[in-house]
Image (cartoon, rainbow, N blue to C red):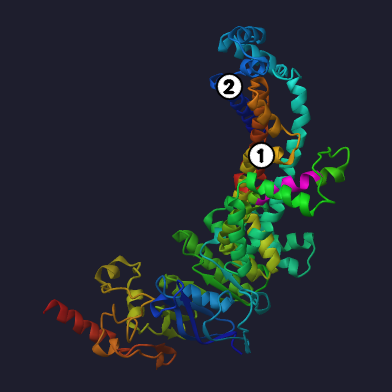
Amino acid sequence: MSLVELDRVSVHFSRGQRRTRSDTVHALDDVTLTINPGEVLGIVGESGCGKTTLGRVIVGLERPTSGEVVVRGVKRSRNQRPGANARNDGFQMVYQDAAGSLNPWKRIGWSIGEPLQNEGLGKAERRRRVTELLDQVGLPGQMIDRYPGELSGGQQQRAAIARALASKPRLIVLDEAVSSLDMSTQAQVLNLLKDLADQHPVNYVFISHDIAAVDFMSDRIAVMYLGKIVELQNSAKDTHPLVHPYSITLRSAVPVPDPAVEKGRSRIVLTGPVASASDLPSGCRFHTRCPIAQPICSEEEPELTEHQLDTSVACHFAGEFEHLYRRSSNSNTQP
Amino acid sequence: MILLLGRRLLEAVGVLFVLSVLIYTIGTLVPGDIAQQMTGIEGATPERMAEFRERLGLDRPLLVRYADWLGDAVRGDFGVSLFSERDIGADIRAQFPVSFEIAVVSVMLAVIIGIPLGVYGAVHTGSILDRLLRGLSLIFFSVPTFVSGVLFVWFGSMFLKPFYTSYYIPFTEDPLANLRAISLPCLAIALPASASIIQMTRSTMISSLQEPFIDTARVKGVRETRVRYLHALRDALGPVVTLIGLMFGALVGGLIIVEQIFNLPGLGRGVLVAIGQRDFPYVIAASLAIATVYIAANLVVDFLYPILDPRQRDQE
């Protein structure tokens, strides 16, 4: 049985008093997604594309405007307090802002140990478990009596991960969990997360704008643009290249470590206006910036359909990027 | 910590000194003096007034008089009242506890009323009760004490007759009678004060509830009441504590009016009477007593911060 199923989930936020159409922000639109036990799902996209909202819907901090969330075969009730289901579902979240996610007034040990109170553990037993968790995330035991402000950014993120692990979750949503860390610390924390996944029966949903980090972490990748999933890769990352023009562009922005290759590589730079989530463009949401947009793209919205084995894409011209891109860049240079 | 305390105490002494200079000088600038007041009763002639001033030492230069006063004051002798010729120190020692009790009880009342209602407003933003609370607190905040105080006296003597008494009896003599006498004056001071505590708690609490660690606590499976009071209110309390500290000082103005209206033998009424009589030795002594309380309240708040906020504690 799948761990979580999202069935045509939409989240719309309305601003202001008048609920006119342009006041509604489409954070998520018709997202259908399955998370299977034992896999890491990566979600990638630029800021404002709805990644965080998707993570919050999965954990239960956000209620879908429409659509269903099914957790291990059971539909989630629509009228509950935000976050109230997380404990029973065994879902946790780690935020980009690790410092903010730890109560600044409480010692690290207290914050990590708070969920253990629910299990009815005594004080000494809780302290022993917290020390264990700190050890697992690579923090020295004396950090237990520190306040969040006394830790470095990397240490705070490790503490936040220990906190998430404390309640033995089935699923942890890592929302830009390493984005605020510098590169060397990022690598350490990513490796730590991988090691932890080997030790614990835990799934990750890894949300990031950094496609390289998502590639490194994930078994499956969902690419999001303006509240929609535009591409879903269901297999290991290296077997298939990404197909959607937006995905190709994202990946082309990652520098290649080999300078010789990097020099000869061309980078696709997007032009055109970034569409707003409160004033969606007609047709395909990406057509305003798409390097290979054709007349049909502004008229008809493509559905997410299976393009080849293990790859679903929402694009009218899936698989034709190379061909169309060469043609359009040629026509641009020779008017 | 000790060093900081010492520095703060030294600063407080400095403030009191500057204050005494200011009040002393302002006192001489005010038109009319005690001689006019005293002789006015018996028929004033310039000769009689001059004779009177000479007797009280008022004909000496300002600097000499001030130095003379300061010398006595640091030894705890504030002289005798020019009007009643009673010992000022003893009078203030008798009046001070009355005002202090009213101030403390009022602030406590304001906190007890204000904080839970502020939390309610933040949690149920936009609900009918929240809007009602905001409207009411605006009204309570806007009505001056001399209006609400009179209304309270009227209400107390018309409808709460068996309960309310207007004779002040010290707490140590009869606690119940004491509470009966100070209940309404304290309420008159506490209501506008609680209005601002409601507003402050509400707004800081709203932003605290949006902190990521609140979501984290919910996801941890923490009960909602615990999320609100242990996680969010704790975070929101800082500015509220500052406000309460300031309030304690600002109460003095309210005390003068309320003690007058409710006929309470406190410091506020004492000052008011003394100003009318141009009895400056008394006014100075009482002002310094009030300033001391104000400074002490702010000192307490300053030292509460590190206890409330681990981030402000000294690093080892």
Residue type at mark 2 is Gly
In this rendering, does residue A216 appear at all?
Answer: no
Above or below residue B75? Residue A184 is below
Could you tell me which quadrant the N terminus of chain A lies in?
Answer: bottom right
Give yes or no for contact between labels 1 and 2 (Cβ–Cβ under 8 Å).
no
Q: Nearer the viewer, residue A152 or B230?
A: B230
Disc 2 target residue: B27
Q: Chain of mark 2?
A: B
Q: Locate residue B119: give its quadrant.
A: bottom right
Residue at point 58%, 21% (across, down) = B27
Q: Chain of mark 1?
A: B
Q: Locate residue A265: give its quadrant.
A: bottom left
Q: SS for tag 2?
A: helix
Q: Is residue A25 left or right of residue B177?
A: left
Crowdedness near tag 2: few (<14), some (14–19) or many (≥20) residues, C-alpha within 10 Å: some
Q: Nearer the viewer, residue A140 or B257?
A: B257
Above or below residue A301? Residue B106 is above
Q: Main secondary structure of the magenta part?
A: helix
Crowdedness near tag 1: few (<14), some (14–19) or many (≥20) residues, C-alpha within 10 Å: many
